[in-house]
Image (tube, helix red, strand yellow):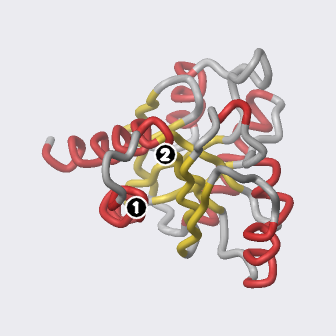
């Protein structure tokens, strides 16, 4: 069994694509996923699967959500190693007196093309900042996130890949859930 974390994009936000976590857990368990645990209502699902491929699991969960709930939802599947790397290598943590509430992480479904990375870097979202490393966009909002031009929609349109963002505290909590599972 392989442990995965599925990050769903755009559910339970502003009354859109409402999915109760209890119903989602049950649907996943009914479809062979084990040790299913959700964290908050925004769609963070830790689980075990016989499938090792993150891409295959993304497609399976996408199809499951469409079948059971009728929504087309982007799904990004990552592992514990990805979260550990993000937590240790966030370049913004090196800044003195960084306000952790300004930090967000966008997880990408796949590696964007270099020319698309350049398109995103050239987009106007100042004064906010990004650093892209592999399938991760490290973000620092200097405006409140809700007022920023640096949106998930902008990131997806420039990079041409599906993406979903989490704030820094949620990212660390998801890593903690993986670690607690290991120690249990």
Outermost residue toward the left?
183
* Residue projecting furthest to the bottom: 114
Q: Earlier in the sequence, mark 2 or mark 1?
A: 1
Residue 146, horizontal then vertical, whole percent: 69, 30
Q: Secondary structure at mark 1?
A: loop
From the image, tell me which residue sits under label 1.
Answer: 90
**Most foreground residue, 135 or 50:** 135
Disc 2 element: strand
Cα–Cα span, label 2 and label 1: 9 Å
Residue 51: percent from left, percent from top: 50, 63
Image-quadrant location for residue 34: top left
Q: Taking 12 as reference, is 57 left or right?
A: left
Determine the residue positioned at 83% across, 65% down: 158
Label 2: which residue?
103
Q: Is residue 112 left or right of residue 80?
A: right
Q: Is residue 3 left or right of residue 115?
A: left
Q: Classify residue 51 as left or right of residue 66.
A: left
Of the pair 119 and 11, the residue shown nearer to us: 119
Q: Quadrant of the C terminus?
A: top left
Q: Is residue 147 above or below residue 161?
A: above
Question: Residue at the location (74% across, 45% down)?
Answer: 151
């Amino acid at each position: 069994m392989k442990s995965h974390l599925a990050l769903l994009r755009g559910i339970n936000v502003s009354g859109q694509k409402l999915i109760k976590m209890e119903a989602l857990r049950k649907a996943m368990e009914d479809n062979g996923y084990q040790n299913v645990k959700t964290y908050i209502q925004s769609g963070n699902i830790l689980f075990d699967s016989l499938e090792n491929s993150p891409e295959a699991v993304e497609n399976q969960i996408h199809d499951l959500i469409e079948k059971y709930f009728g929504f087309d939802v982007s799904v990004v599947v990552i592992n514990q190693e990805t979260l550990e790397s993000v937590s240790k290598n966030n370049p913004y943590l090196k800044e003195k007196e960084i306000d952790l509430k300004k930090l967000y992480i966008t997880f990408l479904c796949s590696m964007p093309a270099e020319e698309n990375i350049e398109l995103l870097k050239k987009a106007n979202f100042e004064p906010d900042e990004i650093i892209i490393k592999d399938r991760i966009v490290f973000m620092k909002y200097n405006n409140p996130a809700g007022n920023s031009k640096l949106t998930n929609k902008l990131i997806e349109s420039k990079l041409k890949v599906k993406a979903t963002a989490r704030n820094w505290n949620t990212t660390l909590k998801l890593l903690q859930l993986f670690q607690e599972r290991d120690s249990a």
